Image (tube, helix red, strand yellow):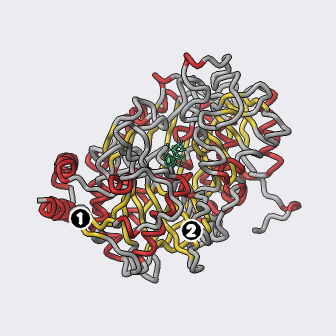
Amino acid sequence: MATAAHTMTPLPELCGAVTAWVSSVRELTQPAAVHWCEGTEAEARELTAGLLRAGELLPLNAAKFPGCHLYRSKPSDVARVEHLTYICTRSQEDAGPNNHWMDPQAARAKMRELFRGCMRGRTLYVIPYCMGPLGSPLARCGVEITDSPYVVINMLVMTRAGRAALERIARDGSFVRGLHSIGELDPERRFIMHFPEELAIESYGSGYGGNALLGKKCHALRIASWQAREEGWLAEHMLIVGLESPRGETHYLACAFPSACGKTNLAMLIPPASLPGWRVFTVGDDIAWLHPGADGRLWAINPEAGLFGVVPGTNPETNRNAYDMIRRDTLFTNVALTADSQPWWEGLKSGKPVTDWQGRPYDPARGPAAHPNARFTVSAKRNPGYSPHAEDARGVPITALVFGGRRREVAPLVYEARDWAHGVLVGASVASETTAAMVGQPGVLRRDPMAMQPFCGYNFADYWQHWLNVGATLTRAPRIYHVNWFRRDAEGRFLWPGYGENLRVLAWMLERCAGRAGASESAIGQLPRVEDLNVAGLDLKPGALAALLAVDPALWRQELADIREYLGRYGSRLPAALLKELETSARRLG
Ligand code: GTP
Ligand code: SPV
Ligand code: MN
């Protein structure tokens, strides 16, 4: 890149289209100052120091957690707000029954009034960013304008942000425009608007996660899914993990589970001691962009550069790598504190909270010490298992796709789809219990197709057709699986130990893909028999594995009826191929 220190062009001179947009936003929002993000280490340090001085960030125990800080969000601003998230397409049909919709002109007018003068007395930050490796033809760029320095320090970790991204935007000639203001952080004046036809996002009134870090769910899923359909690829809520088997072969899986259902943990899996010879590499933990390759395979890049992960539940036994990763240079949001200013959360298994996530003396009567959606922000490079191929320009080739949900019953531990079209039905049929990652009642079962219910930027019926179309271009399509790590027994305890032990299920999938593992045919797909899974050293209660691998015909007849009812909401736009697959399963159930 032609930017030696002595010839550094000022950022506002690099790309006229960006500068013109910044000027118009400046006029509308009336900030006291404008800061263009260079993306240097020094800049991140200065921003952090400023937040510390302002008391917006709290230092954590520097001996035990060097370089770590705590941010407390407003108690009314702790998760994504799906009920205030809109897809604003000219035609409501294009947004589909899966999205809240608003007419784009009405939405623009509404947002204009909210944004008018909203940055008075504040600094407007311009964050040029690239989703995906800077040199990758598969990467896509955007610019986020925000008045939240907390958002800036998150974006600097989560994306490739700053000068190099702006240089790429100047070359590409196109970028996603993301305008964000925390406004008054008033839940009554909060909207997350998407204009896929104009590659634009407008977000007001929240400073939290997916509502405010616009490169993440707003751009890399909602807008990108729209771009992906036009360009013939897929933008998915998937982790990407590499598994090196004891044979020395490495295969990559991309897995879609709903929010707070185990993506980060699976992406960073630690093999149990009783499965020697396996190594696991993380490519991504939340989002995958999947492209058909010239070789007929599906290739995946991770558009993100950091992890914005769920803190509760992380401990040395569930995930040693995650536990170690967040012990330095990590930004914590909404965790509790110990007496000596160490971060604390439920499931940590050591230490004692004295201050809760709202900064009050901890009182168990007021609920958990850490917020259930407390998060860590950390560079992907801090992950000891970060894949050496994570930054490959063309991505990594995918051997299998996996869908999953959090279901106490019905869905077995694992099953294999009959083929791609059936796999699309399996993905479209995902249901899962809601979690703290979104505002609302947790633990309620809902349909969450492909784990994309909150994130698909267009009509699901068109999206499933697009999945079918992409599959038709692949001569070496990945096999498709469904998993459920969250089955429970009559007492409500998890039947499956999960975490590292999930490798046993992934190993079966890879053996299936290599034509080496057995299965038994069921109405809903192929399941491993008990003897097909490697259970050496696994301590399960008697009967647990049989229960995990059972397909109850009565429950599944009800399940297929529910799926039929759900798909019916998409009317005549629903691809006929999905109904055909559903009928095949129903016929086999009898
Ligand atoms: P988002 O970042 O919201 O998209 O979440 P995610 O899908 O990455 O989920 P994550 O891996 O952070 O896990 C969410 C919660 O589920 C954490 O509390 C984990 O400890 C727990 N969890 C993850 N994997 C398993 C598993 O295999 N079994 C059980 N029982 N719990 C798990
Ligand atoms: C999710 O909710 O799926 C997340 C967190 O990964 S957020 O960035 O808030 O979307
Ligand atoms: Mn997620």
Q: Amino acid at mark 1?
A: Ser
Q: Residues within 10 Å of mark 2 (few under 14, many from 20)?
A: many
Q: CA distance from mark 2 to mark 1?
A: 29 Å
Which mark sits nearer the N-terminus, 2 or 1? 2
| Number of callouts | 2
Q: Which residue is mark 2?
A: 242
The answer to whether 74 is drawn above or below residue 15 in the figure is: above
Question: Would you say 504 lies left or right of 449 here?
Answer: right
Label ID, residue 576: none
Q: Left or right? Give the position of 166 relative to 497.
A: right
Q: Report the disc number at residue 522.
A: 1
Front-most of residues 335 and 194: 335
Provide residue 138's location: percent of width, then percent of height: 54, 68
At horizontal 22% and vertical 46% (from top left) the residue drawn is 566
Q: Is residue 337 above or below residue 257?
A: above
> Residue at (63%, 31%) from the top-left corner?
334
Tell me if residue 301 comes above or below residue 199 in the rendering. Answer: below
x and y percentages locating residue 416 in the rendered image: 33, 66
